[in-house]
Amino acid sequence: MCDVLPAVPEPISADPPGSPRNALLTQSWLDLAFLHWAVDPAEVAPLLPAGTVPDTLDGATYVGLVPFRMHRVGWFRLPGVPYLGTFPETNVRLYSVDAQGRRGVVFRSLDASRLIPVAIARTVFQLPYLWSRMAVRRSDDTIIYTSTRRWPGPQGAYSRITVRPRERIDEPTDLEHFLTARWGMHNSAFGRARYLPNTHPRWPLHRAELIECDEDLTLSAGLPRPLGAPVSVLYSPGVAVRFGRPASSARSPSAGSTRAR
């Protein structure tokens, strides 16, 4: 349980609330599949960092499994790096809100295929990046994402996901906005709770058919049970993203407090 309690959460918005003046990081996220499972908030609350509680919609929160292609990560105003900054990635994520009402995601694991970016992210940002053997490939009208973990473990944790993108979504539902329009990340680094804001254009979203999902990344990330069939499967060709500088996500002195269980 945690003794935090958010102010009223900020509105769910398909468009970013603002843009960072000086971008800390730039990158593009391409060929994303969004797989989501509804869970009881009490199941995942212990997995969130201090200063946050599960973000909910109609009483449920969600576990996300998101494979994609990271493209040309860049620092400050430098151009993105073509090789070290370009690689497949698959993340397991939860949905969070802090005492200032900021909605975000919490990454439980981030598998990536480039060792040097993994080491930098683990050291500088204390993010749970893991080095894995990965591939993203197209076959006819499907996209296949594969990963097998190398380091630091559990070694052999894996995923194989195949989706078939379908029609473009003109009017996403409230749930689809809730799952995809997240404008920040919560994490703990060097003993302090942090919020890292991001901005990007509105997601181009498509319905997607799930052909195959064989994985144990969610269990390896600390989820308490197998999740069954996802309740939402989406695809996006991608967006260009900018990250601002981290801010504290500690409870503000004026914020109220309740106990989340």
Image: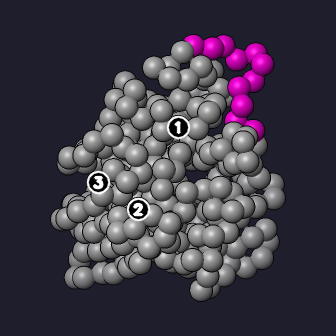
> Residue 3, position in %: x, y?
59, 19
**Residue count near mark 2 (Cα–Cα under 10 Å), binned few <14, some 14–19, many ≥20:** few
Q: Main secondary structure of the magenta part?
A: loop
Of callouts 2 and 1, which one flags the residue occurring earlier in the amino acid sequence? 1
Q: Is residue 46 left or right of residue 99?
A: left
Q: In this picture, is 68 found above or below 55?
A: below
- Helix, strand or loop status at disc 1: loop
- Helix, strand or loop status at disc 3: strand
Residue at the spot of label 2: 154
- Helix, strand or loop status at disc 2: loop
* Depth check, front residue: 122 or 207: 122
- The reply to whether the C-beta atoms of the residues labelled 2 and 3 are less than 8 Å apart is no
> Residue 34, position in %: x, y?
37, 56
Q: Which residues are magenta?
A: 248-258
Q: Which numbered circle lies on residue 233?
A: 3
Residue at the spot of label 1: 48
How many numbered marks are there? Answer: 3
**Residue count near mark 3 (Cα–Cα under 10 Å), binned few <14, some 14–19, many ≥20:** many
| Residue located at (32% from left, 35% from top) | 39
How far separated are the C-alphas under marks 2 and 3?
26 Å
Is residue 67 visible to us here? Answer: no
